[in-house]
Amino acid sequence: MGGFSDPIVTAGVAGLPALYAAGISPIEVAEAYLARIERLNPAINAVVELDGASARAQARASARRWAAGEPLSPIDGAPIAVKANIAVEGLAHTAGIKAYARHLAQTDAACVARLRAAGAVILGTLNMHEAALGATNDNAFLGRCENPHRAGFTPGGSSGGSAAAVAAGLCAAALGTDTMGSVRLPSSYCGVVGYKPALGAIPTEGVTALSWTLDHVGVHARSVEDAGLVARACGVEAPAPAQDRPLAVLDFDGLATLEPAVAEGFARTLEDLSRAGWRLEKLRIDDLDLGALRRAGLLISEVEGGIEHRRALALDPEGFTPQLRSLLAWGARQPPAKLAEAYRLICESRRRILALARLYAAILSPTTPQQAFAFDRAVPASQADLTALGNVLGAPALALPSGEASGLPLSLQVIGMTDGTTQALAARLSEALPSAAVPEAFR
Amino acid sequence: MGGFSDPIVTAGVAGLPALYAAGISPIEVAEAYLARIERLNPAINAVVELDGASARAQARASARRWAAGEPLSPIDGAPIAVKANIAVEGLAHTAGIKAYARHLAQTDAACVARLRAAGAVILGTLNMHEAALGATNDNAFLGRCENPHRAGFTPGGSSGGSAAAVAAGLCAAALGTDTMGSVRLPSSYCGVVGYKPALGAIPTEGVTALSWTLDHVGVHARSVEDAGLVARACGVEAPAPAQDRPLAVLDFDGLATLEPAVAEGFARTLEDLSRAGWRLEKLRIDDLDLGALRRAGLLISEVEGGIEHRRALALDPEGFTPQLRSLLAWGARQPPAKLAEAYRLICESRRRILALARLYAAILSPTTPQQAFAFDRAVPASQADLTALGNVLGAPALALPSGEASGLPLSLQVIGMTDGTTQALAARLSEALPSAAVPEAFR
């Protein structure tokens, strides 16, 4: 994803060391992003808390390290922002919930601490769907986050601010979280790379839990290379050569209804991959019910999320929207047998599908059954049907931009087996895919 | 564990091919075990349903294969019996619950089918604690199973019949199931090897579930070699050389109260291992609460077990003992938040402890905090405190006989990382341990 007028933004993460070598300093890089945030963020409301003074201090420290020839890592100096459910010392740690408006993080989340240890410049926090439990990012407390590709359209969620900020060039990369698709889904709607590493590959300490069973921390970036660099700074393993196995194309006939534009785009993508020499095989998973898996994940999230927020719900119920309160109260009312059946479905599906998936290099599908839609349209229930599979499996999964239809992004989901092989595979796959367009108003 | 007067029984599983080579046929082997069952089982009530005609037919088929020089596997002809919660075609599949007294299995459980495909002779089914939810095997429906080492003493449970039958030489090996220790615990009380492979290593299809989160199928045998042969016939991986890492000795100070005889026996075992050249390091796991893990596992079992038996509970409540009915009803009454917290504790403990355990070849502890006890003694709540750790981790774990105190067996628990390395390690460890005594009345 090149196409920005400013070469600093076009450089993303991986291109920054070349700029430093050409005499541009991390201080100029940070200033470029801070200026863009000031100028462009009001149109989309992706950034919710900016820490300019701290970002400038971090950038100066990075500049000194590069000048001394001692950068901490390849991402030293890269300006990164994080979803508002990830603790950044001194900033409000709200998870998009008003009840936590005055809750300042005392320490960095483990993933933020790792980014800082790698020299990244932490810019601030990003908009999200309230409590990460929903996928429109129409947040009453933080304000609605807009899709940079079209005003009045959802960026998706729950990490909508993260995907929108990366697509609009307001940061070089961003962290998000993904319980049923919350990194990949908004990446699909906003046309950026969304990388959810395997369960536990990035620690969740210091992240407001939605579900300790399904939560993953992930990365939004403008290329697979950038996403991999940031993920590795957070502790994810390095790319590794994959075995020569075919790609499985998930046969979702009867499993998911795709919007026509998504179905046509996916067919074109498969043709592109075929032409580029990839071996594709249809994979039918018997008795797979994506809707049932998504509903099981939702129930687990409502119960586990309700436990996470139990104290605040009791002390300040008005600090939660009635919609969220009602979801969490519904979870708390379900009989334990229903919750146990949900865990059972997840656990048994994981074992069964992983046994099949091991025969392939990866499983391909569209990332979402639909493209971004207008805020005034009814929210489709199936938004996370294709992404939730990656959380059920606990397997690494990426959303890769794969062109556009009617001016809105399309996205290919790649579910792999290990983080090393999946990064290497995604890098090669993305070479065969059309590059993502920069949203016009943000070039 | 040699010491039987009959060389056929002393041969266990691994020694049978040498007997066949010496002209003893699988038919004589089967007849020897059938005769022992007829003569010796009444004293302990370990075998609950015997299928002599089928066993003889299987033995004849095995004899033909060995005569033709075409055995199906190294265990072809080995007489094996299975716990009553594992389906054997045509036999009652009761899980020790009276409500299922007339429930005949239509097909073999997957693990039994694998044993048959390897040529094993399936003798019949074995006593167990009702529903596998308890550890004394004082079963009102099937009758009490006695410890072969001492009349009036529990063999442990829930796979009490499996451990007792193997210790008494009524079968060459047995299958059991292990949700919180149900293979290893009775193996400890009866002085046999109990091997619970990693979660999912032996399929659970056709096994009455107690908990699909924690259930494992495992093997009881008179040596590590025998247990490994049977486990591998069920699909478990082959032994693999382990990396040179120290053994972790679980520091359970404040975590579990050991009977003095168990504590002294364990100290002697560690001295034996030290003298044999093993490197031992104390492993303290901060904030570990074994009792809390066991209670979480129990709650999950009560809820998940209640779902498994929902239909029978509704149709024939009197087919369950009042004790079991009350445990399952209690599970069904708990709020979902309590169940979710139990899953959370299991899931978070697994991740945290595995990260520590990876630095060691294995974690050692006594298998149980106590030795076998008299049926009229109060049942200690802590019976499964040390074994449940293996189920929480989903890691391979063995109970290894480690001598005796006051004429009753002692046992060492070995929790490893992979099935391959754990089998290889356990075989070497057992060389340094005193061999188990054959119960006097069964020699």
Image: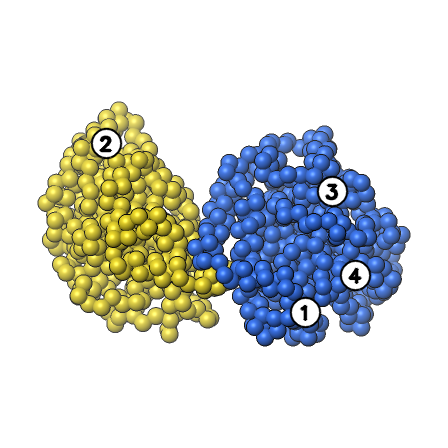
Chain colours: A blue, B yellow
Disc sitting over residue B58 in the figure? 2
Q: Chain of mark 1?
A: A
Is residue A387 something one can see in this rendering?
A: no
Disc sitting over residue B316 in the figure? none
Q: Chain of mark 3?
A: A
- Residue at 39%, 59% (x, y): give it: B332
Mark 4 Cα shell of 10 Å, populated few (<14), some (14-19), many (≥20): many
Kindly identify the amino acid type of the residue bearing the numbered disc 3. Answer: Leu
- Residue at 41%, 50% (x, y): give it: B212
Indicate the quadrant where residue A267 lies.
top right
Query: Which residue in the structure is indicated by mark 1?
Result: A98
Q: Position of residue A376 (x, y in %)?
A: 75, 52
Marks 2/4: CA–CA distance: 74 Å
Marks 3/2: CA–CA distance: 60 Å
Mark 1 or 2, closer to the camera: 1
Kindly identify the amino acid type of the residue bearing the numbered disc 4. Answer: Asn
Q: Earlier in the sequence, mark 4 or mark 3?
A: 4
Disc sitting over residue A410 in the figure? 3
Q: Position of residue B421 (x, y in %)?
A: 41, 50
Kindly identify the amino acid type of the residue bearing the numbered disc 1. Answer: Lys
Are labels 1 and 2 assigned to the same chain? no
Are labels 3 and 2 assigned to the same chain? no
- Classify mark 2: helix, strand or loop: helix
Marks 4/3: CA–CA distance: 23 Å
The answer to the question of whether label 1 and label 2 lie on touching residues, with beta carbons closer than 8 A, is: no
- Residue at 60%, 52% (x, y): give it: A180
Q: Position of residue A389 (x, y in %)?
A: 58, 46
- Classify mark 4: helix, strand or loop: loop
